[in-house]
Image (cartoon, rainbow, N blue to C red):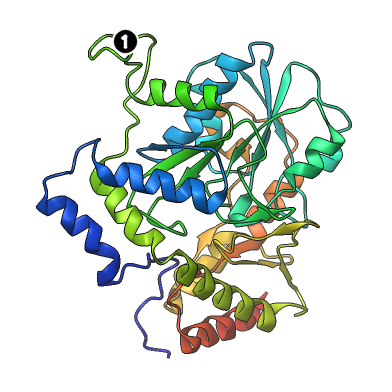
Amino acid sequence: MEDILKIPVYKPFLPQKVLHYAHKALDDLHIANNGPYLFNVTEELQKICNVNHVVLVNNGTSATHLLIKILKKFYPGIRKIIVPNNSYVAVYNSILYDRYFEIIPVDADIDTWNMDLASISSIPDDTAIFVVHNLGNIINVPAIHRRFPQAIIIEDNCEGFMGKYEKQYSGTDCVASSVSFFINKLITCSEGGAVFTNNEHVAKYSHLIKSQGQSSKKFVHEEIGNNFRMTNLQAALLLGQLQYLSEIIEQKKIVFDYYRKNLENKDGIVLQKEEDGTENANWMFAVRFIDNENYERASKFFDSCGIETRPMFYSIREHKHLNFINTDDNVAKRLSDEIVVLPSYPELTRSELDYIIEKVLLYREKI
């Protein structure tokens, strides 16, 4: 295996049968932002995830931005949003686009790698919680509701799609949630995203904003909107993926279970801990090397072995445009130094997994 080509950190599951609907959309010239596959995917996702409304959009960041617009529209008393201090930057940017809310960062939990909500004793009336399921590790949102019954919660479920909390799918027990169908997500249409909600008014507003704010009368607009529309061609590719969703989930489970079996309880290596009552989405598998100097050192080693990796999300302090230089990020900083995200795609072979695990253990010896 020493001379293998680089094992990528992710590649989508795209057998020829998955592409059937996309080819049909091209043949029928149904490639714009209307067409039958948009309806088909919406219906399938509602049924699979047991959610009342799915609003398809062009990418996960647009979906996340819509969550912020929903908060502003339906909860005018909210002016602050609690966020993890170690998430993908789209969370922070989406809040700042409209220059309306104040960001309240919370440091990470050393075990779950999600935000440490246990450190919060109360939620003020003017503050919402933005839950983010880092690397697909699910935060127990129903438990948050029990602890803070009046709290307004939205979810960035872009990495947690098909994870569960207390037997229901993540992203379905909140005001609204965002989902991503980016190339490295569980299912993909290259880009693409969605808003999930059980609130009809929220769904209607999301449809309005994503379509330039257009009213029922063509070219007459009710609000300042955005062009966040998914195309029928994207939806066609997504529908093909949905036909194989159970197979993708099963193959990912095999990969994650194999990693866990061979890497848990190894000296100097820690795996992400799951909250009680949750089921991990098995999106990206990562290991934490205790006392690792920084991710760059690990990346250099794995690159030399032909293994592509990626870092854990850096602290909010690292994004200079956000101006959070003085925020407490001791845990987030440590996690970004010590965590290495490993190849996690469905079609990883047993020999590739064995090779990656061998190099993980070898790197641990070198620290």
> Is residue 32 placed above or below 304 in the rendered structure?
above
> Is residue 219 placed above or below 202 in the rendered structure?
above
> Is residue 231 placed above or below 164 in the rendered structure?
above
Residue under the image location 54 percent in, 61 percent down? 283
* Image spot of residue 40 (x, y percent): 35, 47
Image check: 318 left or right of 150? left
Q: Is residue 278 visible?
A: yes
Based on the displayed image, in which of its 4 quarters is residue 293 positioned? Answer: bottom right
* Image spot of residue 102 (x, y percent): 64, 19
Tell me the amino acid under the disc marked 1. His
State the quadrant of the C terminus.
Answer: bottom right
Residue under the image location 23 percent in, 40 percent down? 35
Front in this rendered view, residue 110 or 46:
46
Residue under the image location 32 percent in, 19 percent down? 212
Q: Is residue 363 visible?
A: no
Residue ID for mark 1: 221
